[in-house]
Image: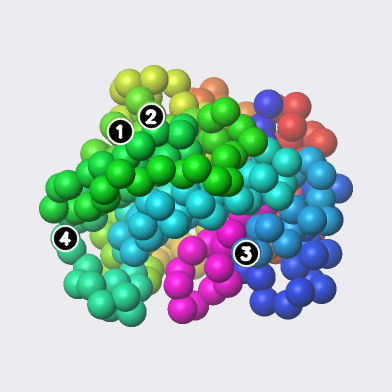
Amino acid sequence: MAQFSLQVQPTDAAEWIDTARRAEAAGFDTLTAADHPGSCAAPFVALAAAAAVTSRIKLGSYVVNAGVREPMLLATDAATLDVVSGGRAVLGIGAGHTPVEWEAVGRVRPGVRARVDRCIAVMEATRRLLAGEKVTVDIPELTMHNAVLDKPRPVQDRMPLLVGTANSRLLRWASEHADIVGLTGFGPTKSDGHQHQVRWRLADIDDQVALARAGGEPVLEALVQQVELTDDVDTALAGTARDLGMSVAELREVPFLLVGSADEIVAAVRRNRERWGITRYAVRRPALELLGPLLPRLSEV
């Protein structure tokens, strides 16, 4: 059964509240907010506001930058969201990639290996705090002494952990420890510090899924970059195909795009489940109107 999460950037109170209510009514499984300090709203504050006007939809970060977040504060934010939402919090974490976010907190962005080391350390420490353990860590990437999350205690015994990544080591770690693996399809960060190259060749996706399944059976979610209802797929994908050096035929098979007629999108979701076991999709705000009417059909795939 396919599920969809809706990622939204809160910019206006009335619109954010309305979006949360509409997403729940349409049947989205989760409402998520990004974490880019300095360029978007604080995710847990925004999600707590959404919790007050909804009752069923899950609420999650997508995804927290582990490079600039401390486990004690992160666990407190996540537990508080879980309390005020009545047990609907989802904790999404990634290694981070935007250099200015490190600079803003007085740190130098480390290389890929060190960012992954830090991300794993933060996830493990945060998980232990949410479980009620006393946590001491003394490694180059993270230092904590006798940290305990006494209050607030989360409602859920095990808050779902979503790891958003395309990194091989993180995929392996997530295969054993995460509840949801968010497949991003990202390659190296481009020179602007924000955008990415992509790893969208079908063989690349096969490899990513294999790593995400290496140690367990987490739910697989694809981060969708384009949602478009159209009867002319070739034209809709022509620019992306040209930019990426891929054919439209190849892009039709990629789970990071949902482009086509309603029937074609339903068929793509079914195909992705059969080939890769992908059963969740993270989509952005425009998909609320585009996919909302389709969710009853998609939920049956």
3 and 2 marks in contact (CB < 8 Å): no
Q: Is residue 240 left or right of residue 14?
A: left
Looking at numbered disc 1 in the image, what kind of residue is underneath it?
Trp
Q: Is residue 296 above or below residue 116?
A: above
4 and 1 marks in contact (CB < 8 Å): no
Looking at numbered disc 2 in the image, what kind of residue is underneath it?
His
Q: Earlier in the sequence, mark 4 or mark 1?
A: 4
Q: Give the labeled residue for mark 1.
A: 173
Q: Mark 3 and mark 4: span between their CA atoms?
A: 30 Å
Does dot 2 land on a helix, a strand or a loop?
A: helix
Q: Which image quarter: residue 299? A: top right
For the residues carrying marks 3 and 1, which lies nearer the camera in this image? 3
Q: Mark 3 and mark 1: span between their CA atoms?
A: 29 Å
Q: Earlier in the sequence, mark 3 or mark 1?
A: 3
Q: Is residue 188 magenta?
A: no
Q: Outermost residue toward the top?
A: 216
Query: Residue 66, image x and y in percent?
Result: 35, 55
Q: Which image quarter: residue 170? A: top left
Q: Give the labeled residue for mark 2.
A: 177
Q: Which residues are magenta?
A: 28-44
Q: Mark 2 and mark 4: span between their CA atoms?
A: 23 Å
Query: Residue 212, image x and y in percent?
Result: 36, 30
How many numbered discs, if any?
4
Task: Name the residue located 38 percent from the left edge and 29 percent from the top edge.
Answer: 177
Q: Give the labeled residue for mark 4.
A: 111
Does dot 4 land on a helix, a strand or a loop?
A: loop
**Residue 15 appearing in the image:** yes
Query: Residue 213, image x and y in percent?
Result: 37, 24
